[in-house]
Amino acid sequence: MPGAPPGGKPAWWRNWKIMLPLWGAIAGFVWLGLHFNVDRSVIAGSVVAFGLLSNAFAWLLGVIALVPVIGPIIAKVLSIGFIWLLNAVGYLVSYIAIRRGYSKDVLTYRGLTIAVILGIVIGFVLGKLL
């Protein structure tokens, strides 16, 4: 079996019989949290912490990469550090601007940032396909 140590079973985070129910549990807990009006930042933080500790995000990215032609491209785009850095800087600037009273300008700025990120992603995908 690919990815398995010689003569052994694959690591638990590579086993779909464990990861698929894990993602189902994550989705169920998110639904329960939203149903019982738990603060959204608590839900998001819990999902990020649990997903990173259990390698659930890496497994999901691997599943996306299995889709023929477009899957590997999407996986590459999602793993580009520049996109992550651009988004993190956007959140930092948004936080500072909101604290100083520029809420309306933040909406415009975040809209432009999302448009730029989408443009980069679409350009990357088209560049790889053509």
Image (cartoon, rainbow, N blue to C red):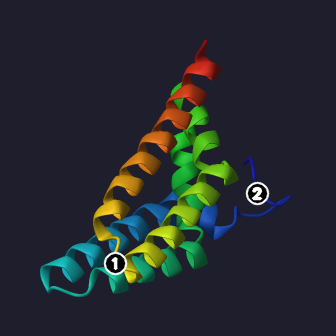
Residue 62 higher or lower than 16, as above or below: above
On the question of residue 31 being in view, the answer is yes
Q: Which residue is mark 2?
A: 4
Residue drawn at x 40%, y 81% is: 100
Q: Nearer the viewer, residue 14 or 1?
A: 14
Q: Which residue is mark 1?
A: 101
Q: Residue furthest right?
A: 6
Q: Is residue 13 left or right of residue 21?
A: right
Residue drawn at x 68%, y 54% is: 81
Residue drawn at x 59%, y 17% is: 129
Q: Tell how many labels.
A: 2
Q: Disc 1 residue type? A: Gly
Name the spot of residue 56 as percent of width and height, x first: 53, 66
Residue drawn at x 58%, y 48% is: 78
Q: Disc 2 residue type? A: Ala
Q: Nearer the viewer, residue 106 or 19?
A: 106
SS of the residue at dot 1? loop
Residue 83 higher or lower than 65, as above or below: below
Name the spot of residue 126 as percent of width and height, x first: 55, 20
SS of the residue at dot 2? loop
Q: Label 2: how many residues lie within 10 Å, few (<14), some (14-19) or many (20+)?
A: few
Q: Is residue 102 left or right of residue 85?
A: left
Q: Label 1: how many residues lie within 10 Å, few (<14), some (14-19) or many (20+)?
A: few
Q: Residue furthest front?
A: 101
First in sequence: mark 2 vs mark 1: 2
Q: Nearer the viewer, residue 126 or 59?
A: 126
Q: Nearer the viewer, residue 119 or 59?
A: 119
Name the spot of residue 90 as percent of width and height, x first: 51, 62
**How far is mark 2 from mark 1, CA to CA?**
54 Å
Q: Residue furthest top?
A: 130
Q: Quadrant of residue 123?
A: top right
Residue 113 higher or lower than 26, as above or below: above
